[in-house]
Image (cartoon, rainbow, N blue to C red):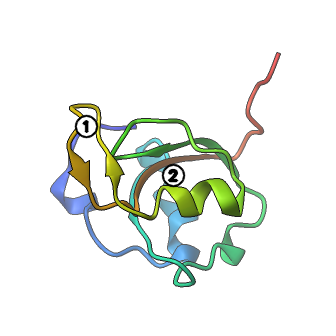
Amino acid sequence: MHQADSSCHTLIPVERMRSHLHHGGGFKLEVSEGTTDFSGLDGLFVADFRCAVCGEKVRMHAGVISMHLRPHYNLNRRMEPGGTFFMTLSELPPYEP
């Protein structure tokens, strides 16, 4: 993920995320249940998907993601609203030994 760049902090439609990969493929997502459609990302891979609240790596499973949509404890043991994630996209499949 690249360093903070205010020109990148915009609402990017899913179909334009592919063209945004030249910045490193890192995105901060704020989602709620039933509002996000990633169907336009065919051919891209999620290299990393983490909860911005607790820092945990989140599996791409509806049940696991929905747990992070609810309020939960951050790294400092303070309750925060969920639904914010850091996602890194790649055109290459992730390496798994």
- Quadrant where the N terminus lies? top left
Disc 2 residue crowd, few under 14, some 14–19, many 20+, Cα 10 Å = some
Which sits earlier in the primary sequence, circle 2 or circle 1? 1
Q: Position of residue 60 (x, y in %)?
A: 69, 52
What amino acid is found at the position of numbered circle 1 in the picture?
Gln
In this rendering, the answer to whether 61 lies above or below 75 is: below
- Seen in the picture, residue 40 relative to 51 is either above or below; the reply is below
* Residue at (67, 60) in percent of width and height: 63
Which x, y percent locates residue 20? 46, 59
Mark 2 vs 1: CB contact within 8 A: no
Please name the residue shown 53% across and 78% down the image. Answer: 33
Of the pair 97 and 2, the residue shown nearer to us: 97
Q: Quadrant of residue 47?
A: top right
Residue with the mark numbered 1: 3
Report which residue position mark 2 lands on: 21
Q: CA distance from mark 2 to mark 1?
A: 14 Å
Q: Is residue 43 left or right of residue 7?
A: right
Secondary-structure class at tag 1: loop
Label 2: state its secondary structure. helix
| Relative depth, front residue between 12 and 64 | 64
